[in-house]
Image (cartoon, grey):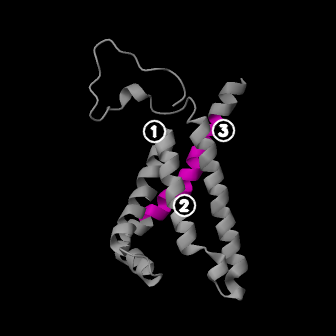
Amino acid sequence: MIARTNDVALLVARLAVAALFLPAGIGKLFGLSGFAASLAGKGVPFPELLAALGVAAEIIGPVALVLGVVPRLTALLLIAFTVVATLIGHSFWAFPEAAQQTQQTQFFKNVAIIGGLLFYFVSGPGTYRVPARLLPRWGVPKAAGTRIARGRT
């Protein structure tokens, strides 16, 4: 009973985190030039490239979360994106005093998101995920008769 509760909690957590990233990524995808311009305005080098990479992370990461595939890689991708986005957008110490409290709240909200992603990194997706045997192994031919381990990956 506890294992099932844990698996349901992991699924709900994955969906909640994906609900944060995916709509933002889709919005940025349809306004990619505006997103790149905002990065350029903040002095970010290669804003077009980084905007495209950011959108890719904000779309691919949540889809992988929902499916429960490659959890460690997904967690690391979204952690890296969140760290970069936090440092670019919410470095509260660089804002005028009137805006520092709001930006500090956003900064620490992102730190909490990173904490949740670290939990995902160590716990994995739980039972409710797309089974690994249904996913292609890019570049790695499956030998005849081999089995995929049933552990939490």
Real-space Cα distance between discs 2 and 3? Answer: 22 Å
- The residue shown at (55%, 28%) is 152
Type of secondary structure dominating the magenta stretch:
helix
Residue 137 appears in which quarter of the rendering? Answer: top left
Front position in the image: 135 or 26:
135
- The residue shown at (44%, 48%) is 63
What secondary structure is found at the residue carrying circle 1? loop
Q: Can residue 151 be seen in this view?
A: yes
- The residue shown at (66%, 88%) is 96
- What's the amino acid at mark 3? Ala
Where is residue 120 shown, x and y percent of the image? 59, 42
Which segment did they paint magenta? 8-26
Residue for badge 3: 9
Q: Is residue 21 magenta?
A: yes
What secondary structure is found at the residue carrying circle 3? helix
Q: Mark 2 vs mark 3: which is more N-terminal?
A: 3
- The residue shown at (66%, 27%) is 4
Residue 126 appears in which quarter of the rendering? Answer: top right
Where is residue 125 shown, x and y percent of the image? 55, 36
Q: Mark 3 vs mark 1: which is more N-terminal?
A: 3
- What's the amino acid at mark 1? Val
Q: In this view, does 27 lie above or below 43?
A: above
Residue for badge 1: 70
Q: Is residue 66 visible?
A: no
What secondary structure is found at the residue carrying circle 2? helix
Q: Say which quadrant the N terminus sits in.
A: top right
Residue for badge 2: 82
Contact between marks 2 and 3 (CB within 8 A): the answer is no
- What's the amino acid at mark 2? Thr
